[in-house]
Image (cartoon, rainbow, N blue to C red):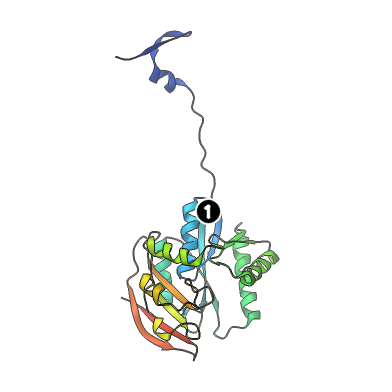
């Protein structure tokens, strides 16, 4: 039986129609703030991206990656540009590469970074996001350089417990290979290994689980924020210097 109500303005109506007749206030979706993410292609910048996207407060307008001109690879990590471009495509986020020469001086690096930041500033972007965890001197350096051009830093995973963070990374279904290891911190044989619970168990107690002190760098090839996995495999080990052992991650 349908319940009816009497109104002062006319004949009886159903309760449903009374609610329908009331004017509903329109809801406006909050405008997301546009940010640029400093992107190494590795685990920490990936987790920073994951948290930025999950917050629904930010739109990542570009991935900013430093690439060494002579090698055509991600600086420090040594990952091929081809794989970097596939990451950006799978994330559906534009890639902005800042090219630097090998053995780049700090002066050249800072000049090119100022030019790059100025490029984003003219687009109305005032925040650069980073995957830093706890190194105060690194954060201070970034904040000082950004302040010089009227910008500021955003640190979505700052001060997260590193053991918890890397286990969350694994638990969420992200997949990554170690692209470079510091042989003064961990054994050279770690290069090319998958980031999984077995790797965490094998790391020496002196190493940070997330490699925050530079023990290792990684390349993320799959996970919940990627449209599709990047087909790749661990290739040959390359000892570019006595200290750093690289794994040449190659397209599969």
Q: Does the rendering let one see residue 190? A: yes
Please provide percent x and percent y for residue 52.
50, 56
Kindly give the residue lying farthest to the right in the view shown: 148
Seen in the image, is 87 located left or right of residue 37?
A: left
- Front residue of 54 and 164: 164
Seen in the image, is 4 located left or right of residue 185?
A: left
Residue at x 47% of width, y 72% of height: 209
Q: Residues within 10 Å of mark 1 (few under 14, many from 20)?
A: some
Q: How many marks?
A: 1
- Front residue of 239 and 147: 239
Q: Secondary structure at mark 1?
A: strand
Please provide percent x and percent y for residue 75.
51, 78
Seen in the image, is 90 located left or right of residue 62?
A: left
Q: Is residue 245 above or below residue 218?
A: below
Q: Residue at label 1?
A: 58
Please provide percent x and percent y for residue 168.
42, 62
Residue at x 52% of width, y 73% of height: 212
- Front residue of 165 and 100: 165
């Amino acid at each position: 039986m349908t319940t009816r109500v009497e109104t002062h303005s006319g004949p009886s109506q159903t309760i449903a129609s009374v609610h329908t007749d009331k004017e509903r206030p329109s809801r406006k979706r909050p405008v997301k703030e546009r940010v640029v993410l400093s992107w190494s292609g590795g685990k920490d910048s990936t987790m920073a991206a994951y948290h930025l996207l999950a917050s629904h407060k930010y739109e990542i307008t570009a991935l900013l990656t430093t690439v060494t001109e002579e090698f055509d690879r991600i600086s420090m990590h040594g990952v091929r540009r081809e794989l970097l471009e596939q990451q950006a495509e799978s994330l559906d986020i534009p890639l902005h590469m800042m090219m630097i020469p090998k053995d780049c001086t700090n002066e050249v690096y800072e000049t090119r970074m100022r030019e790059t930041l100025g490029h984003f500033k003219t687009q109305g972007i005032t925040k650069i996001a980073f995957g830093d965890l706890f190194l105060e001197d690194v954060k201070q350096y970034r904040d000082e350089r950004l302040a010089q051009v009227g910008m500021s830093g955003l640190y979505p995973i700052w001060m997260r417990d590193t053991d918890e963070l890397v286990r969350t990374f694994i638990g969420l279904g992200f997949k990554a290979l170690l692209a470079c290891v510091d042989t003064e911190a961990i054994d050279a044989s770690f290069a090319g290994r998958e980031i999984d619970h077995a790797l965490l168990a094998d790391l020496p107690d002196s190493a940070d689980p997330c490699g925050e002190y530079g023990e290792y760098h990684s390349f993320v090839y799959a996970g919940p924020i990627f449209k599709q996995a990047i087909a790749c495999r661990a290739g040959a080990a390359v000892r570019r210097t006595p200290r750093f052992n690289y794994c040449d991650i190659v397209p599969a």
